[in-house]
Image (spheres, rainbow, N blue to C red):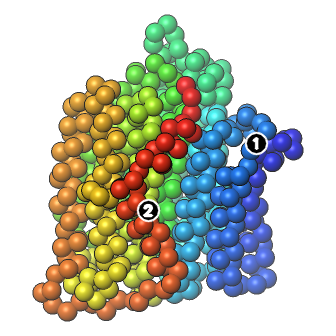
Amino acid sequence: MSFAELHALLPQLILALGATAVLMLGAWWPSRSCWILSGVGLAFAAAISAGLLVPSVAEIGGMFSTAPYARFFTILWSLLVGLTLLLSLRYAETHRFAGAEYTSLVLFAGAGMSLLSAASSLVGLFLGLEAFTLVLYVLIAFNRGDTIGAEAGLKYLVMGAVATGFLAFGIALIYTSSGSFHLPEAMHGLQQGDHMRPLGLAGWAMLLVAIGFKVSLVQFHLWTPDVYQGAPAPVTGLLATGSKGAVFASLIPLFAAMGALAGELNSVLAVLATLSMVGGTLAALPQRNLKRMLAYSSVVHMGYLLLGLMSGGADGQRAVVFYIIVYGIATLGAFGVVTSFSRADGEPQDYETFHGLGYRHPRRCIALSAFLLSLAGIPPMAGFFGKFGIFHAALKSDHQVLALVGILTALVSLYYYLRPIIVLFMQERPAHELRRGWIHEFVVLAVCFSLVLLLGIYPGPLLELIGQVLPQP
């Protein structure tokens, strides 16, 4: 690897080498707050370097792109990692996490998400995806005293291993059919006349199974509610936002490289999107546990993102990227509120715990209400423009039936998003006493709340920026 390639890889090196240094030094100085704050600094340094860096090479090792699109998502995931660590500071103290190990794992996850979003080859896609998936196996079960967390980690490990097998097999079939791992050549090599080669189609079937597991599309979503419920709240926020968002970020250049061949997958993608939107909505309706409700609702949101991906073109791509961002902000904020309320004996999840809490802890409950309203797509929250962009792109690409299904499920989702808000401000009986928040938790929640409101009122600059960094076909 040349010096120019190492220079272009600097943001990922800051995350990965910084994580290694924290892990090694933490064995000699076991201080939680010191290492977590060091991780926050490393994550923000990676984001700054990605923003200021001007690479002199187009690719790194023929596997990872250095285009503005890749650097944009490196900034996004680095900031997400920094906010997650800041949110974890008090949580790690309460649950006696090993600070250096926890920090290094979260940083490694950020490096993996960045590499996945920058993948320009099938090998890079595999390495980036597995880099953060392996980390999440450990992070989900990081609270060793929690049996539910251990069960969640085991379920994610088993399902993730199955998905990895499908992914590797699918990549092998595509390589056999096309003779290349590099995305443009590999996707072009799949073409036989006006159709896709049968072996390449089989490879894409394997890839879709793996992607379905990773982003929890119906019928590959069965691990999602148990893992969301059992994992530590900051880890759940990272899993729900960064890991799934990075997968969709990698699919945009992948589908762009396919060109007209992407239309051959539309029938399968339409079934997956419809099942995810309808199935996730129906499963979320009866939930009385906040984390499980957010788990099933995430299945619906993945269906929306798949609909935007199917729409294609600049409008569809821009809508998907914008939705990844606004969904990530609102979801991180929601799990941030759960984190701030948690105590040593557990996290508040059941709606019974939230009765009347809005009068005892008004600031955090108002923030949680705003995040849920954004996920529901209620103006002036950012989620409204996110859903509008997805449905608009779907209608422009002649997916009227899918757009109608999406709009109907969005209307039904008002019930399960408004239900916890109503519970928060009920006065039937005195609210439970939950933990008072710390300043760093309020900082994270304030950032998420401000962005949700700002992007809902004035989304134009972000949409223009996204349009400038989108990969060219």
Q: Which residue is mark 2?
A: 451
The answer to whether residue 348 shows anywhere in this view is no
**How busy is the neighbourhood of tag 1: few (under 14 within 10 Å), some, or many (20 plus)?**
many
Residue 55 is labelled as 1
- Left or right for 23, reference 271: right
Indicate the quadrant containing the N terminus: top left, top right, bottom left or bottom right.
top right
Sequence-first disc among 2 and 1: 1
- Left or right for 28, reference 436: right
- The extreme right residue here reads 3
Locate residue 278, reporting x and y percent: 23, 46
Above or below: residue 45 compared with residue 424: above
- Left or right for 300, reference 263: left
Above or below: residue 115 compared with residue 44: above
Q: Identify the amino acid type marked 1.
A: Pro
Indicate the quadrant containing the C terminus: top left, top right, bottom left or bottom right.
top right
Towards the viewer: 381 or 280: 381
Locate residue 466, reporting x and y percent: 51, 42
Tell me what residue is drawn at x 27 percent, y 45 percent. 277
Q: Spatial distance from mark 2 to mark 1, Cα to Cα?
A: 29 Å
Above or below: residue 24 compared with residue 157: below
Tell me what residue is drawn at x 65 percent, y 58 percent. 47
Q: Identify the amino acid type marked 2.
A: Leu
Locate residue 163, reporting x and y percent: 49, 45
Towards the viewer: 172 or 231: 231
Locate residue 64, reporting x and y percent: 68, 39
Give the label, 2 or 1, closer to the camera: 2
Q: Secondary structure at mark 2?
A: helix
Residue 352 is labelled as none
Tell me what residue is drawn at x 51 percent, y 28 percent. 256
